[in-house]
Amino acid sequence: DIQMTQSPSSLSASVGDRVTITCQASQDISKELNWYQQKPGKAPKLLIYDASNLEIGVPSRFSGSGSGTDFTFTISSLQPEDIATYYCQQYDNLPLTFGGGTKVEIK
Amino acid sequence: EVQLVESGGGSVQPGGSLRLSCAASGFTFSSCALSWVRQAPGKGLEWVSGVSGGGSSTFYADSVRGRFTISRDNSKNTLYLQMNSLRAEDTAIYFCARHLTGHWLIDYWGQGTLVTVSS
């Protein structure tokens, strides 16, 4: 199974700050990586697919980069509505596997 | 608009069984693989099982293989998960998820149904 190591597990930042989350795969997954946002009591929402493609309707302050084993997710200017837990997920191979999540809070 | 609506969750004793359903609409059902993904209370996401668009290929996480069975009825646009020999560690919200055609990329999720296994 491909292990996804996501860090940090939580962070606190101010409105307007740049926020960066990293995800490392245990083997090469090319660009087959998603980033999801999950708010409490809600289903995950797809933000970024194929490592760097922004899903339709998602604000441009969200972005992703990387390939192979190392990936980065960035919120360029944190907004109050961005408070959520963010997950990376690989779909290169079954079983699909997720990172442990990053809980983003406002300082 | 793509919609996935889960049902069938509830409370069950260890060793018991439960059948989840996911009613889909807004897309060509048979064109898309589907999966069940679960989330234990306060924990992260865990893929449980997947099925191809035609239903002939099924896939399972090691943690549920031999206990859970995924199936679909393309005439009813419905996905199922039969869960037998339930354990306390199966307690979770179970989400139905759609895969982009030809991909294992998940693009839509249902709202989930809660399964609680407790004596």
Image (tube, helix red, strand yellow):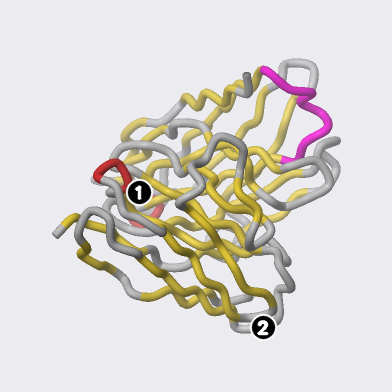
Residue B51 covered by magenta stretch: no
Q: Eyeballing the image, is B65 above or below A31? A: above
Q: Quadrant of the C terminus of chain A?
A: bottom left
Q: Which residues are magenta?
A: B26-33
Label 1 sits on residue: B91
* Mark 2 residue type: Gln
Label 1 neighbour load within 10 Å: few <14, some 14-19, many 20+? many
* Mark 1 residue type: Thr
Q: Which residue is found at the position 63% from the left and 41% from the top?
A: B107
Do circles 2 and 1 both sit on a common chain? Answer: no
Task: Please state the horizontal and vertical placement of residue A100, each as a whole percent of the image.
Answer: 40, 67
Task: Please state the horizontal and vertical placement of residue B66, each as a whole percent of the image.
Answer: 62, 56
| Relative side of A75 to B100, left or right | left
| Label 1: element kind | loop
Residue B30 covered by magenta stretch: yes
Q: Quadrant of the N terminus of chain A?
A: bottom right
Task: Return the chain for callout 2.
Answer: A
Q: Which residue is found at the position 34% from the left and 64% from the top?
A: A18
Query: How far is mark 2 from mark 1, CA to CA?
Result: 30 Å
Image quadrant in which you'd find residue B29: top right
Prevailing SS of the magenta stretch? loop
Task: Return the chain for callout 1.
Answer: B
| Label 2: element kind | loop
| Relative side of B63 to A39, left or right | right
Q: Nearer the viewer, residue A34 or B118?
A: A34
Label 2 sits on residue: A27
Q: Nearer the viewer, residue B25 or A66?
A: A66
Can you tell which of label 2 and label 1 is closer to the viewer? 2
| Relative side of B98 to B85, left or right | right
Q: Which residue is found at the position 40% from the left and 51% from the top?
A: B39
Q: Nearer the viewer, residue B118 or A64?
A: A64
Task: Please state the horizontal and vertical placement of residue A99, each as a whole percent of the image.
Answer: 47, 67
